[in-house]
Amino acid sequence: MNVLAAGAGAGRTAPGFKQIFTQYKILALLVAIALIWIFFSWKTDGGFTSARNISNLMRQMSVTGILACGMVFVIIAGEIDLSVGSLLGLLGGMAAVLDVVHGLPLPISMAIVLASGLLLGFVNGYLTAYAGIPSFIVGLGGMLAYRGIVLGITDGATIAPISPEFEQLGQAYLPPGFGIALGMLLFVLAAVLAWRQRVNQARHQLPVLPLWRSVGRVAIIGMVLAGFISTLNSYEGIPLPVLILLVLLGVFSYIAHQTVFGRRIYAVGSNMEATRLSGINVRAVKLWIFGLMGLMCALAGLINTARLAAGSPSAGMSGELDVIAACFIGGTSMRGGAGTVHGALVGALVMASLDNGMSMLDVDAYWQMIVKGGILTLAVWLDVATRTGRR
């Protein structure tokens, strides 16, 4: 009995790499981002961390981040969608054609594009969930078909110039006062959520973090928000696409953790057969997940076209790789059943920082692909290692 007790005590006192990495995953990513920014700032004589470049970086990251909000649900459910880059290009090109060629008012163009994205997402979901075609094949077919369609509707040419109202969607900035108010609101929200978490844990007799750790987390969030808002306000303010991304972060995080639908997504990815036997309509869950993914492709396509002030037939090329990499880097499990929206957005920031920094240094395109491919492989290896116990 003493031997068993000693063995149990040893198991509790020495957390291994798996436990440490799982607990501090997001913190490790934030440290990695800080190191990336320090390195590129050093190599560019401070140009990388200038207020103007940080603003451009955030706007650039918003497109990948919007797609990641939808993709994280798809991967958590145990599926994959390789068509998102081409679908973004198709819907962005459609928006440009409706605006430039047909001259439709912006609200009508946006409604048509968003509805088309939702519909095409449902098509992908139906083929996967009801027709029984593996999502990998559905996405691969869509990647080719959607790219062909956008080449057809644009005749392979860039559609420009779009209307000034359309441009504002991707290029407008919020007034500095609005940014300060937004930062204060987010800080209060973070404090309230931390307090509610402690109350709920105590109510259900679950382990509660020491008060100093909870206060420290909220304080760190406050400092990050203050630095973020002040940096963007020192240029022209918070870009509108960044505000849209922050709203989506809140909406998708709420869906994931506070709704029945969100719990079903995790259940489907964790054990689909057990979830089906419990009476949950697994196919309907997957259909709606792909529908949301299509809607995010439409929104990202609108913002990308507005940001570039033109509809390009090459828009979104290889975008699916950046999005999937962002999800995996942010801790979404390739096996499904685990992942967070905020983690995927941190992963998107990693990818955008690398793209931006290497472009400023004029790094050859092939080296950029090698670096991003290596980071994706490392992220998946870490997921495998921390979930199987392998080193």
Image: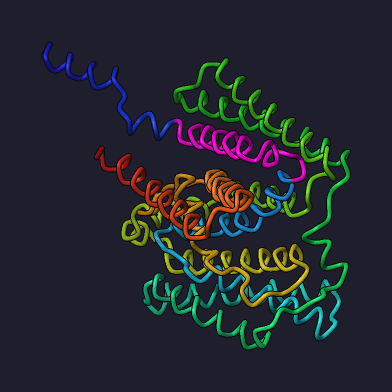
Q: Reply above or below: 163 against 9.
A: below
Give the image location of residue 35, x and y in percent: 54, 34
Q: Tell me if I can see residue 61 in this picture.
A: yes
- The x and y percentages for residue 27 are 51, 32
The spot of residue 79 in percent (x, y) is 41, 63
Q: Is residue 138 left or right of residue 89?
A: left
Can residue 257 be seen here? The reply is no
* Residue at the image position 67 percent from the left and 31 percent from the top: 224
Q: Is residue 176 left or right of residue 143?
A: right
Tell me if residue 367 comes above or below residue 253 in the rendering: below
- Give me the residue at 61% from left, 53% from top: 359
Residue 58 location (% of width, % of height): 69, 48
Tell me if residue 45 is in the magenta stretch: yes
The image quadrant that residue 238 belongs to is: top right
Task: Specify the segment rendered in magenta.
Answer: 24-52
Of all residues, the one furthest to the top in this rendering is: 2
Residue drawn where x is 22% and y is 17% of the image: 10
Using the image as rendered, state which of residue 359 and residue 88 is in the foreground: 359
Prevailing secondary structure class for the magenta stretch in the rendered image: helix
